[in-house]
Amino acid sequence: MGMSPEDAARGLFTVLATGDAALAAEVVHKDFTNREAVVSPAACSLPGPAGALASGAWLRAAFTDLSFPVTDLVRDGDRVWIRLHMRGRHTGPFVHYRDGMLLQAIPPTGAEIDSEQVHLLHLRDGKVVRHEAVRDDLALAGQLGVFPPGPAVQLIQDWHATERAARAASVIAEAAEKAAATARAYARG
């Protein structure tokens, strides 16, 4: 007997926090899609466990001690709503992309983050097949010193002017590709 839909939902966030490729193969459907991947490296849009592993690598590149404590979870048939907090410390560049290209890079601030989020997960065959989210990105921007504009805004401008943002985007995209490649070792033929 497989794991419950609730455990599969929790498992997805364990994959994001840890990069556990074996767990990704267990909880992420081969047809998995992530609606939120539009602001991530291109590898995060890959279907299946590869995309989930790449998304985790992208987040862990920006935030150490990444965790997703769950505060609420509701299941209705093949859908699970999970309310949680994304927590960690901003120790690496937090790079946003659009169409696989650098949009913005927020240099490390050392700030502790705690962002409340609600995720809607669709399941098929006992695995997560689709991910959507509602996040409090404005609060996260405030925790990173980006909103309202403060010293972090000057750091962002400096990073872009000196090409550090482009270099960071390239390094993080490569790390996401490598994380996605680990899914192949756990793919079932």
Image: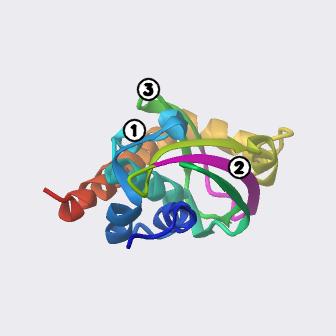
Residue drawn at x 56%, y 57% as measured from the top left: 62
Q: Measure the alpha-carbon separation of dots 1 and 3.
A: 10 Å
Return the residue nearer the eye: 118 or 90.
118
Q: Which numbered disc flags the more N-terminal residue, 2 or 1?
A: 1
How busy is the neighbourhood of tag 3: few (under 14 within 10 Å), some, or many (20 plus)? few
At label 2, the amino acid type is Val
Tell which tag, 1 or 3, sits nearer the viewer: 1
For numbered disc 2, what is the local secondary structure?
A: strand
- In percent of width and height, residue 28 lies at 39, 56
Magenta extent = 106-123
User: Is residue 131 positioned above or below 85 on the image?
Assistant: above
At label 3, the amino acid type is Asp
Quarter of the figure that contains the N terminus: bottom left
How busy is the neighbourhood of tag 2: few (under 14 within 10 Å), some, or many (20 plus)? some
Query: Label 3: which residue?
Result: 99
User: Is residue 123 positioned above or below 39 on the image?
Assistant: below
Residue drawn at x 18%, y 59% as measured from the top left: 188
The numbered mark at residue 118 is 2
156 sits to left or right of 123: right
Q: Measure the alpha-carbon separation of dots 3 and 2.
A: 24 Å
Inspect the magenta stretch and tell me whether residue 107 lies in it.
yes
